[in-house]
Amino acid sequence: MALLSVSDISVSIGRLTPLDRIAFSIDPGEIVGVVGESGSGKSLTAMAVMGLLPLIGGKISGGSVHFAEFELTTLTEARYRALRGRRVALISQNPMTSLDPVRRVGEQIDQVSMMHLGLGKVEARARSVEMMQQLRIPEAKIVHGNYPHQLSGGMKQRIVIAMALVANPELIIADEPTTALDVTIQAQIIQIMTEMARARNVALMLITHDMGVVAQACDRVVVLYAGRVAEMNTVDAIFADPKHPYTKSLIGCIPVEGLPPGGLKGIAGNVPGVLNYPKGCRFHPRCTRAIARCGDEVPLLRASGAGTVACHLAEVSA
Amino acid sequence: MFGFLIKRLLLLVPVFLAVSLIIFMIVRFVPGDPIDNLVQIGSTEEQKAELIASYGLDKPLPVQYGIWFAKMMQGDLGEAMILRRPVADLIAQNLPHSLILGSLALLFSTIVGVATGALAAIWRDSWLDRAVMTIILLGSTVPSFWLGLLMILLFAVQLGWFPVSGARSWSALVLPVLTIGIGGVALVARVTRAAMIEISRKDFVMMLHAKGVPPTEIQLKHVLRHALLPVVTILSLRIGWILGGAVTIEYVFARPGLGSLLITSLNQRDYPVVQGCLLMLAIAVILGTLIGDILQALMDPRLREGLN
């Protein structure tokens, strides 16, 4: 049975509906990539699952989210809070700003196990240091007493990862965990995260805009475009045979060896903003294969091979 | 932290020199001659010159400054021309009244201001927030001397709860403390509320929610702590203002104090006393910012290192 199953959730902020009937699921221990350009609704999906939409004035306006034995959309705030950081944890986009600048980084990790596992100060500290060592933080005991501004970006992100892992959650949502880091440490962080997830059988929802990261780390992929699911499949299948033109374009954006200068393809145009989502398929204005029907009719998600796709042009398995 | 303290203290020396020079010059450039108040009617030019010489006022300004500064460093602020007593005595007599009034007003505005500002920020956009903001607007726009007069009329004259004026009992402190404090409450509450709302939007606060920390704990233990930094800044700037700003309030309530002494001696062009009072106020401002900086460095590790 799926650990997390998101069924047709729509998210609204004021009168806008930036997320439209998103559906996907994550099995225990599975690493699922959620991909799309900026503005496609990846972070909102993360906030929706974490139950943090009220912080930005949003709410889930339809659909349901099941996590383990809970229906999250009807859960009381107090019970939701008991899950956050304990059974579902978040690794945020920017480690530079995710840590409280006036508190020692170690205390910020201790806080999680003291709050959720009922540990005392000493045990919590020992547990944090051990976690930091597993994440290959050198001199973990000393770093435990450092303030965030004394650490590099990569170290700070490891601290954030330690915060997420320390209470042994079943699901970790990593929202573009490497976007704010130097290219040289991006691969390291992805590697250490997936390694830890595999070793502890933690499911990972890895939000990224980088298909290369997906190829490196994930089991399955959910491709989002302008607040809708475009395609979903296993990593192998999606790279071997992408069904959605958008997925194809995203894969075309990965730099490969032997590419002539100027040979890297981008995708023309931008993701439309929530105020001017086009009618029909939201990708059709940028799609090279669009036909008249694409501008009128919303393509539904249909099974196609092992995965699902929302495109009028994709061949569908009967 | 130790290096920070040493640096911060060394910085005081040039500041103090500059301040003393400015005070010395200001008093010299005020129109009107104090000697005119001292000479007896019908005295000759020679007698007047003699009087001027006896106060050292015939010497060039740099020499006058040098003498004043050297004596000041020994605690000798000169002799009052009109009251004919050492200035240091006059200040020693009046300063405690101002200090008590000032520190109580500061304490009142800090506690009440931070509490109301925090409540307004936590229940933002509620009726409580709107009520607090309205009172803050009133509190920061009403001139304090007028507020003082209204309070005297209501609580002292009509209701008779507190004395109208003077400094004979502790109850006489209530109205002046309220009058000075209310402006501070408004200021502190406004800064606390704005800072808390701004900090609530930061990524690390979202992260605290994601860790499952209860919202009230986030607000009180994390957000408020950050919000206190700007509060300390404005309060430390206000220490001098409260001691000196109490000038009109001491006058309204007919209380002894540094402010009353300053006004009286200004009217009489009593140079040494004016200089002494201004010096005390300047020292209060300097000490205020020093205490503020130290408090902030204790609260924020980034500041400690930035200055090291």
Image (cartoon, coloured by chain):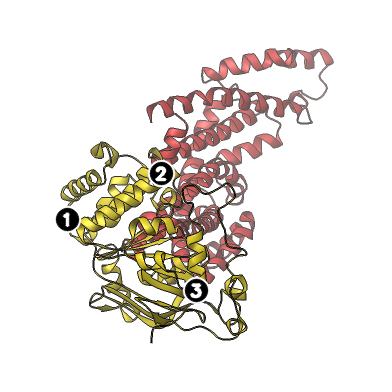
Which amino acid type is shown beneath numbered disc 2? Gly
In the displayed structure image, the side of residue B274 where residue A249 appears, left or right: left
Q: Specify which label sits upstream in the sequence, 2 or 1.
A: 1
Q: Chain of mark 2?
A: A
User: Does residue A217 appear to the left or right of A231 in the view shown?
Assistant: left
Q: Earlier in the sequence, mark 1 or mark 3?
A: 1
Chain letter of mark 1 equals A
Reply above or below: B175 against B250.
below
Determine which residue is flagged by label 1: A119
Q: Is residue B64 visible?
A: yes
Q: Which residue is mark 2?
A: A153
Q: Of discs 1 and 3, which sits in the foreground?
A: 3
Along the viewing direction, whichever of A157 and B218 lies nearer the viewer: A157
Chain that the image shows in red: B
Which residue occupies the foreground of this view, B280 or B167? B280
Is the N terminus of chain A in the top left, top right, bottom left or bottom right quadrant?
A: bottom left
Give me the chain that's yellow.
A
